[in-house]
Image (cartoon, coloured by chain):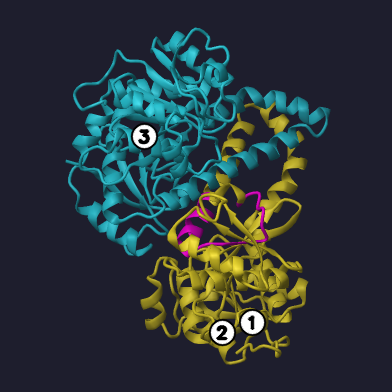
Chain colours: A yellow, B cyan
Amino acid sequence: MSSPGAPAMGLPVAVDAMGGDRAPSEIVAGARQAQDTLGVPVVLVGAREKIGDTLGLDVIEASEVIAMDDDPGPSVRRKKDSSLVRAAEAVRDGKASAMVSAGNTGATMASALLRMGRIKGISRPAIATPIPRVGGHPSLLLDAGANAECTAQMLVQFAQMGAAFASERYHVDSPTVALLSIGEEPTKGSALVKETHALLAELPGINFVGNVEGRDLLPATADVVVTDGFTGNVALKTLEGALKFFMNLLLEVFSVDEDTKRAAEVLMPHLGPLADDLNPDGTGGAVLLGVAGVCVISHGSSNAKAIVNAVRVAHEAVAGDLVGRLSASVS
Amino acid sequence: MSSPGAPAMGLPVAVDAMGGDRAPSEIVAGARQAQDTLGVPVVLVGAREKIGDTLGLDVIEASEVIAMDDDPGPSVRRKKDSSLVRAAEAVRDGKASAMVSAGNTGATMASALLRMGRIKGISRPAIATPIPRVGGHPSLLLDAGANAECTAQMLVQFAQMGAAFASERYHVDSPTVALLSIGEEPTKGSALVKETHALLAELPGINFVGNVEGRDLLPATADVVVTDGFTGNVALKTLEGALKFFMNLLLEVFSVDEDTKRAAEVLMPHLGPLADDLNPDGTGGAVLLGVAGVCVISHGSSNAKAIVNAVRVAHEAVAGDLVGRLSASVS
């Protein structure tokens, strides 16, 4: 177990070789690239014969695979020799410093929670997802889907964990924390939001800037945006869908005829960097905050680059003693 | 009162001249244009001396104005001679066929609800907001913000009202109705969503297609998407924010230098129609479903074109006996 004050820096990051739409080849390629370019030791988790070429990386054997569409709870309970469960156990048992998976998000959470346990004092883990900002560090949205039902007390802890994580990951002093609602006034929103607003307004150690609305997610006006896992997941997927929709429209227009193709060539050098800024492959994935170990959840369509960034985030979280900071943030 | 079976077709549409960021001039211009181009009689509501030039339109006098940031409940109770309250009374009293406002959304809802009352059998009105689709009729998202707290029974009525409205407004036979959640499986989501899913799956007269996720809002996969007013408002504003963000990025890139400006000129003939399709000014605004009269809520930044479309939607809703259809949908 990765415990406060004793970051397991020399240990490898455990990468679930079987999780993700492009597993295992892109995952293994990314893991190898991470080890080579970042100098971070990496160990794959999976069955050697299913992985194929391990590119010379060490392997923690795990004979079973939890599929992207498996029901998280039952699959984690039944598939005790799955790559996800074994990756979480490797962190718990001090064989890995952190885990990374692009697989089934629900099963990743369940594996981490059941095998690593929670940080003392934290009632429920939350998924913190980076929302890209052009020309700046991302904003963090949490909970992005771990808890469909939340209490105000849970949201208060999400605010504390989110602020601690923003400080660690983006080196922000006193990150701004906002509450997602349907109006800026403290009187707007659901009963849950109103109760949470009152608690956050009185909470010491947090730079609470009040409510924000959906339109404040992109471009993000706060460093950390707190919401329940249902609303957060809907908002995040709405954002992803809208960006994809817009990109596709633009690509269609670019390919109308020879003139538009030439126009696109003129614009691409300017659009490319913006697209890179907004590409989730570059942000390193979401992090499950509140479990007693570092667990990075990369998106399902992760390519090698996304895995490199996820390993980097995992490694930095271990080096920055994320678990210790989260523990301190709620105590 | 506009009652089922007796659409008040000869009556004018009451347009709140004082509501909206560009009131009164753009609102009055739009109202006049609507009367001229659609042949729909229009009456302004407001104080003659505040409106200025009424462009020859009739006026229902109302000395007070509810500002965009006034607290809806108290302002509607106190400002009994406000343009919003008088517009709703005009519908109730058979002096107007419908009301249109680009003003304070909460106060518009409160005015309509308090003065017109609810349709018998409907527990709570909901805001149905059109989400544009490229090359097709919009999808309807409801509730877009009238009710921050909902029960499953309320969501079931929203589904029924949404389907009835989609049939009336877009002439869709058996519109598809989806429930917004965080996974397609009936077991995914909050307790509210699971309970609603079970009720909708058994409900006769509705073409229920199951859960959709945030990424299914744009492009919309269902004709009607049902959710609680908190989630709906967050999702809608997230979508609006993302589109605005992307448009602004694109405009910045277009204006980098002479080459990019020329490239933009090549692309604009193709981008223009898409932007028109996505422009909320073209969709005619949201409609408050469930009150005993037609109430169209145009967005705060409405220009004359948006008001023309809002009047058109209001007029068609009266002609199509929307109130009668909504009443029948829940009985």
Q: Which mark is residue A323?
A: 1
Q: Give the answer, above or below, for where B16 lies relative to A163.
A: above
User: Type of residue at label 1?
Assistant: Val
Q: Are marks 2 and 3 in contact (CB under 8 Å)?
A: no
Q: Taking A172 as reference, is A20 left or right?
A: left
User: Type of residue at label 3?
Assistant: Ala
Can see residue B140? no
Front position in the image: B94 or A280: B94
Q: Do the residues labelled 3 and 1 touch (CB within 8 Å)?
A: no
Q: What stretch is highlighted in magenta?
A: A217-238
Q: Taking A218 as reference, is A149 left or right?
A: left
Tag in front: 2 or 3: 3
Q: Where is residue B149 in the image (x, y as percent from the top left)?
A: 38, 55
Q: Quadrant location of residue A165?
A: bottom right
Q: Report how far apart the C-alphas of labels 2 and 3 lie in the structure.
A: 51 Å
Magenta-span inclusion, residue A234: yes
Front position in the image: A307 or B126: B126
Residue ranking furthest to the right: B257
Q: In which quarter of the image is the N terminus of chain B?
A: top left
Q: Which chain carries label 1?
A: A
Label 2 sits on a secondary structure element that is loop
Q: Position of residue A114 (x, y in %)?
A: 46, 84
Q: Name the residue under label 2.
A: A119
